[in-house]
Amino acid sequence: MIAWKLKTRNHSPIGLDIGHDSIKMIQLTASGGRIGVLAADKVKIDSGLNNDTEQRRDFVVSTVEQMLDKGGFRGKGVVSCLANDELKITSLRLPQTDDDKTQMALEKEVSQRFGLDPDKDTIKYMLAGNVKQADEVKNELILFATDSDTIKNHIGLLEQVQLRPVAIDTIPCALFRSFNRSLRRQEDMENTVVFMDVGSHFTTVVFGRGEQICFIKQIPIGGEKFNLEIASKLGVTVEEAEILRRKLRKERAVSSTAGSGELQNEQANFDDGQWLDASMRQVVVDALTSVSEELAKEISLCFRYYTVTFRGKRVERAVFAGGQAYENILLNVLKRQLTVDIELAQPLRGFDMSQQASVHFDSDRRGLLCEWAVAVGLSLKGWQN
């Protein structure tokens, strides 16, 4: 959304992704024609902090300072993004006209729909494509808007940790940039790819074709909704519900890789309470399935809007990213209900990961690292290499 001039260097700005449940920082480097990871770190945010704005901010500031002090990150330039609940995004269809008239129409829309002040708040837009409506060709636009206080607070937080904001981006744009770098074949330019990032509170859906974003949707369903559903069904806390989800994933991972004899040995080796009893397991599965179907329905509506708006444009595949991409029940529901192939994201595939001393990923997720897609896209923004 907002960017400043960046000098060409052999390393990118720091990509800083401050989510609801974790803070991720990553910095890329270029050497010998290859892109590598210079430094990376991730720290979990306790869910209780999200109920207290001041305590959460203090935690974020102290944590980012500690992450920087560990070493490995170079320079103070940073590209960060606004959270989904800090940003208004909507699609608009306007007559083809000059930029001034388009801007005036958007300002009116922002004022009426969101109650923002065009004179002081931030309004940006991008052209998503041309749409034929009746006998007229119109511009399909994607509008981004946020209030000035949100921008000021965000910049203030970055300056508090002695970082220099190079740009403030959006999650959808960072997500698209993270994967668009690999779409260079001619067929990639002609087909539509859907990128989905399922986070803690929101699912971000981005339809892209070639170098162009065509449609964006923020869906207020994420990992927290799964936990709340389980907590409601079982009468437990949200924190306990999250633990039950992890147990179920561990059970399924063990069951999928072990034969019957090996499975019995694994069960015997587990500490007491690590395996769910049958009735509790079924409640957890039902709760996860219910929320997954709700999310799949919302995503299906996005597909319908896109195919109706951009007739004749084929959706080739969907790439599934975010911290909740490891939820197999959700993935299976999406595979059943969506009409395209779904693949798990690997945002760092092909990157040089040899800088081990400064790279701190979750060791059990090194194969995919789905949750790093937005942070990678932020780090790539404005990099001239």
Image (cartoon, rainbow, N blue to C red):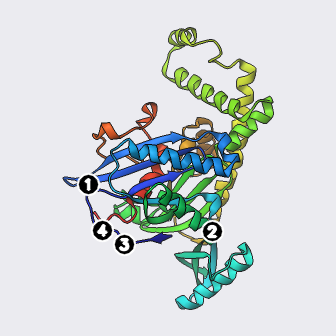
The residue carrying mark 3 is 5
Going by the numbered disc 2, the residue's amino acid type is Asp
Going by the numbered disc 4, the residue's amino acid type is Lys
Q: Nearer the viewer, mark 2 or mark 3?
A: 2
Residue 343's place in the image compared with 381, above or below, is above
Q: Nearer the viewer, mark 2 or mark 4?
A: 2
CA gap, disc 3 to disc 4? Answer: 7 Å
Query: In the image, what residue occupies the spot 73% across and 75% down?
Result: 115
Confirm whether residue 178 shows in the render. Answer: no
Query: In the image, what residue occupies the spot 59% across and 83% down?
Result: 138
CA gap, disc 2 to disc 4? Answer: 28 Å
Marks 2 and 3 close (CB-CB < 8 Å)? no
Residue 69's place in the image compared with 114, above or below, is above
Q: Secondary structure at mark 2?
A: helix
Dot 2 surroundings within 10 Å: few (below 14), some, or many (20 or more)? few
Q: Secondary structure at mark 1?
A: strand
Number of the label disc, if any, that sits on residue 309 = none
Marks 2 and 1 close (CB-CB < 8 Å)? no
CA gap, disc 3 to disc 1? Answer: 19 Å
Number of the label disc, if any, that sits on residue 7 = 4
Number of the label disc, if any, that sits on residue 149 = 2
Residue 156 lies, in percent from the top left, at: 54, 62
Dot 4 surroundings within 10 Å: few (below 14), some, or many (20 or more)? few
The residue carrying mark 1 is 30
